[in-house]
């Protein structure tokens, strides 16, 4: 079995390599491993955290292969599944009551607190993929948690930008962006006393949202009771807004960008990003040649700027 990190020297980033997925057993049709009463879930829960059965990372990974030229590393870490409700037939997290979404976030907060204490844990990435269009095979509402021994590349880039901006202006980049968005108003999606959500000025995806707490915080564990409740409400409103665009559920990806778990990163500002990938009814935008090969995104404004005013 292979489970290791391979260093891409051209791009300067890790690739997680694993053969565990090939061992995926045949599941009877109609069987859901996330429903109450399944072997790993049991009964009597409202939200449950499971080990991913086909992980890319493990607390006890095998020794990585050795190569005379290329660099490899141990696939130390953890991959978890956050099952967001016992109810199988709910379509999306946004269909859950705010109170239940809050419980999902509270559970996630507990995982962040617990995993920060592990030696291998450099970073905790929470993400959610929605829709068969982007490869989601199990429809029972769930999201994923990767605890990685490295800082993901996009977060690394953001950390650098925040650091540079602070050096130049002595201010936080995202605190300034919140101010600009609230002055411009046109891209604002929703605001509460503790959070604001807007469509970025520079979107990569057809429908994109950035959700950020007003308070300058770095980790999910720093959010207080009220901020967590407001985040639950914001998630529901923004994701329901996405559904309203096409008057039906639409595929999206959601990711939490927080600071690395180790060290002091008080120049950084936590936020969530949501990428709606459907550009017109049943037409997806793909990260294709320009986006993957060049790394720069294209965005079509001919349907008019969204966001309302
Ligand atoms: Zn289920
Ligand atoms: Zn800030
Ligand atoms: Zn980000």
Image (cartoon, rainbow, N blue to C red):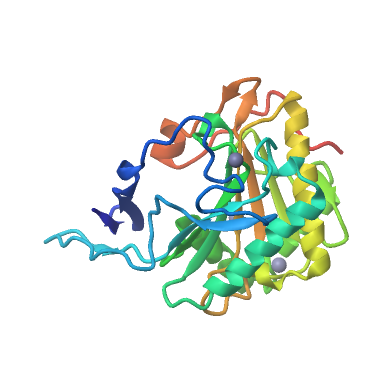
In terms of depth relative to the viewer, which is nearer, 172 or 232? 232
Q: Residue at x 54, y 39 (%)?
A: 32
Q: Residue at x 46, y 71 (%)?
A: 121
Q: Is residue 196 above or below residue 219?
A: above
Residue 44 is situated, as x and y percent measured from the top left of the image, at 67, 56
Q: If the picture is divided into quarters, which one holds ligand 2?
A: bottom right
Q: Is residue 308 left or right of residue 7?
A: right
Q: Quadrant of residue 71?
A: bottom left
Residue 106 is situated, as x and y percent measured from the top left of the image, at 70, 63
Q: Residue at x 56, y 46 (%)?
A: 34
Asked whether residue 170 appears in the rendered view, the answer is yes
Q: Quadrant of residue 203?
A: top right
In terms of depth relative to the viewer, which is nearer, 171 or 278? 278
Query: Which residue is farthest left?
Result: 68
Q: How many marks?
A: 0
Residue 258 is situated, as x and y percent measured from the top left of the image, at 60, 64
Q: Is residue 123 above or below residue 249?
A: below
Quarter that holds the C terminus? top right
Q: Is residue 183 left or right of residue 85?
A: right
Asked whether residue 180 appears in the rendered view, the answer is no
In terms of depth relative to the viewer, which is nearer, 75 or 97? 97
Residue 29 is situated, as x and y percent measured from the top left of the image, at 48, 30
Q: Residue at x 54, y 47 (%)?
A: 38
In terms of depth relative to the viewer, which is nearer, 269 or 30? 30
Q: Is residue 239 above or below residue 68?
A: above
């Amino acid at each position: 079995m292979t489970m290791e990190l391979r260093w891409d020297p051209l791009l300067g980033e890790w690739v997680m390599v694993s053969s565990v997925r090939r061992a995926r057993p045949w599941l009877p049709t109609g069987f859901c491993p996330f429903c109450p009463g399944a072997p790993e879930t049991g009964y009597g829960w409202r939200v449950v955290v499971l080990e991913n059965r086909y992980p890319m990372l493990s607390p006890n990974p095998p020794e990585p292969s050795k190569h005379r030229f290329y660099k490899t590393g141990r696939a130390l870490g953890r991959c978890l599944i956050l099952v967001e409700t016992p109810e199988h037939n709910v379509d999306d997290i946004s269909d859950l009551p705010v109170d239940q979404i809050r419980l999902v976030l509270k559970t996630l907060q507990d995982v962040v607190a617990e995993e920060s204490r592990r030696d291998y844990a450099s970073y905790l990435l929470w993400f959610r993929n929605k829709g068969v269009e982007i490869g989601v095979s199990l429809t029972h509402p769930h999201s994923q948690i990767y605890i990685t021994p490295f800082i993901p590349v996009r977060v690394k880039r953001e950390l650098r930008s925040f650091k540079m901006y602070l050096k130049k202006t002595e201010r936080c980049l995202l605190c300034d962006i919140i101010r600009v968005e609230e002055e411009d108003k046109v891209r604002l999606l929703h605001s509460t006393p503790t959070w604001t959500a807007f469509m970025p000025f520079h979107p990569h995806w057809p429908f994109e949202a950035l959700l950020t707490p007003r308070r300058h915080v770095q980790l999910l564990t720093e959010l207080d009771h009220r901020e967590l409740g407001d985040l639950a409400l914001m998630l529901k409103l923004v994701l329901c807004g996405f559904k309203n665009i096409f008057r039906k559920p639409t595929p999206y990806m959601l990711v939490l960008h927080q600071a690395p778990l180790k060290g002091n990163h008080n120049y950084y500002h936590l936020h969530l990003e949501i990428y709606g990938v459907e550009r017109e009814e049943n037409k997806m935008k793909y990260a294709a040649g320009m986006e993957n090969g060049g790394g720069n995104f294209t965005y079509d404004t001919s349907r008019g700027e969204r966001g309302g005013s």
